[in-house]
Image (tube, grey):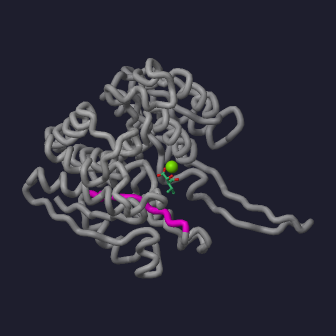
Amino acid sequence: MKIAVFAGDGIGPEVTREAVRVLEALALPGLELSEGDVGGAAWRKHGHPLPPKTLEIARAADAILFGAVGDFDCDKLERHLRPEQAILGLRKELGLFANLRPATVFAGLEDFSALRPEIAGAIDLLIVRELNGDVYFGEKGMRTLDDGRRQGWDMMSYAEDEVRRIAHVGFKAAQGRAGRLCSVDKANVLETSQLWRDVVIEVAAEYPDVELSHMYVDNAAMQLVKGPGQFDVIVTGNLFGDILSDLASMCVGSIGLLASASMATGTMGLYEPIHGSAPDIAGQDKANPMATILSAAMLLRHSFGLEAAAARVEGAVAKALADGIRGGDLGGTLGTRAIGDAVLERL
Ligand code: IPM
Ligand code: MG
């Protein structure tokens, strides 16, 4: 069990530390952890957000536990040197094309949602976001038009095989859940989305047991706030998935509770909390490590097939929350280490 641990920037190191303690407490045979530098932290030390050495550690690992990247001091750097390039580079280099972002409300936390508790309580959905294509990885540039105006441009595209492989992930996920898949696009305006929709419909023929629906992304944003309980699995492209998954996290309540997995074909995966580096509270023992701990649970499940161990970790987090363990994100006073301790006690 070779796990690369990339803590990154801001609160990344402190939340990752707690998740590592949980993994170690499970005393899994063959567990081997190796640390690597990413993000602004790596840029400071090595002059690049994703140094070759880090990539090497990643390639040698069976799975990656990732903290967060993002650092205000780096915002003025050329784009290829910015911290975000570490996560984008890992996604691309390792072919991590399928991003799984579950959003569920923990019992008793309905009041923390930005939505009315009875609406929030019904949330149990999974966003399957494509991660290797779309406008994120298309050609881009800045140019000056003939009349002297500056223009920024980014090319959005999807090839059919890229849509097909993420569609399969979406359909399979739906088969393992309530059997409903909603494909989100903007086919009323974008050719990229028209192809997306056509290919998803083609793939649907292989999954007669899954009920497929389609929704435009603007409507999906509205429906996620109006009645998030209607969704089981949402499959969507890179940009729309980025936006909708943040939206879904606030419907749940705290972004400090949401984990994610980014999978390649096979069992290689990168696991990270969906929150960012939160530089404003970094190093102050204020961040909630639960999202990272829950990401470690996803790692056990998706990369190593250790369902029982994953459920044990998730159970410990749920128990801690049920017992009233709360950090600042949930109106409490407990710090990062104390929350980690509370989860470990219940493990
Ligand atoms: C996410 C983040 C990243 C993204 C950033 C850090 C590049 O927002 O994982 O959702 O846009 O994909
Ligand atoms: Mg995002």
Q: Is residue 67 magenta?
A: yes
Rendered residue at 11%/50% (across/down):
26
Seen from the viewer's position, the closer of residues 313 and 10 is 10
Q: Main secondary structure of the magenta part?
A: strand
Rendered residue at 37%/60% (across/down):
284
Q: Could you tell me if residue 264 is visible in this image?
A: no
Rendered residue at 16%/47% (across/down):
344
Placement of the C terminus among the 4 image quadrants: top left
Q: Quadrant of residue 174?
A: top left
Seen from the viewer's position, the closer of residues 97 and 19 is 19
Q: Position of residue 32 (x, y in %)?
A: 16, 64
Q: Left or right: 334 with respect to 213?
A: left
Q: Position of residue 90 (x, y in %)?
A: 41, 63
Q: Which residues are magenta?
A: 63-72
Rendered residue at 30%/67% (across/down):
59
Q: Quadrant of residue 152?
A: bottom right
**Taking 24 as reference, is 274 above or below it?**
above
Q: Could you tell me if residue 26 is visible in this image?
A: yes
